[in-house]
Amino acid sequence: MEIAVKLLVPVLLAGLMLAPAAHARVCAVSIDSTDQMSFSQKEIKVGADCSQVKLTLRHTGKLAATAMGHNWVLTRTADYQPVAMAGMRTSLADSYLPKGDARVLAHTAVIGGGQTTSVTFSTAKLAKGGDYTFFCSFPGHFAMMKGRFLFG
């Protein structure tokens, strides 16, 4: 009996170490942006079984990031305009976002025409059925370049 327990313990420990990885699911999402200040989608849906999201942003235009740069920012809907307004007081180097702002749940860097960027973020901070908005924080873009992010 004692030998069986000694053999069983390592097997159980190995199973526990693998369990979180077995349940992790990374969901890939892509969205395009243009020189006409638009996103290709007004809504992004991610299932509740996704533990992480890998969002890829592509800028299909030709203009440089300094002239018509775009990024992708995720906040709670109630925080979207205050974050966008605060971002207008920052710079391109900061992706037009306040540094270390906890209201920013995820974001990409600002990119220019022909460029692609991505961000991978955990869904642990998201509530199933919560009210989330994604937007571009380049100054003046947030009013037109926004959409709903649905989790759950």
Image (tube, helix red, strand yellow):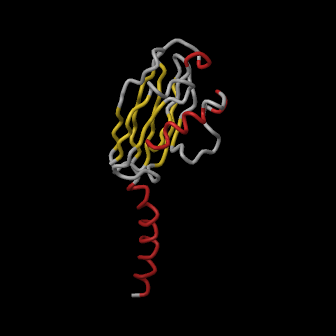
Q: How many marks?
A: 0
* Percent of width and height locating residue 8: 41, 76
- Name the residue located 43 percent from the left edge and 55 percent from the top edge: 21
* Percent of width and height locating residue 119: 51, 37
Q: Quadrant of residue 27?
A: top left
- Name the residue located 48 percent from the left edge and 39 percent from the top edge: 74
* Percent of width and height locating residue 30: 41, 30
* Percent of width and height locating residue 93: 67, 29
Between 31 and 4, the one lying in front of the other is 31
Is the N terminus in the top left, top right, bottom left or bottom right quadrant? bottom left
**Can you name the residue that lies furthest to the top here?**
62
**Can you name the residue that lies furthest to the bottom here?**
1
Q: Is residue 104 above or below residue 1?
A: above
Asked if residue 95 lies left or right of residue 142, the reply is right
- Name the residue located 49 percent from the left edge and 43 percent from the top edge: 79
Asked if residue 63 lies left or right of residue 78, the reply is right
- Name the residue located 56 percent from the left edge and 26 percent from the top edge: 138
Between 90 and 32, the one lying in front of the other is 90
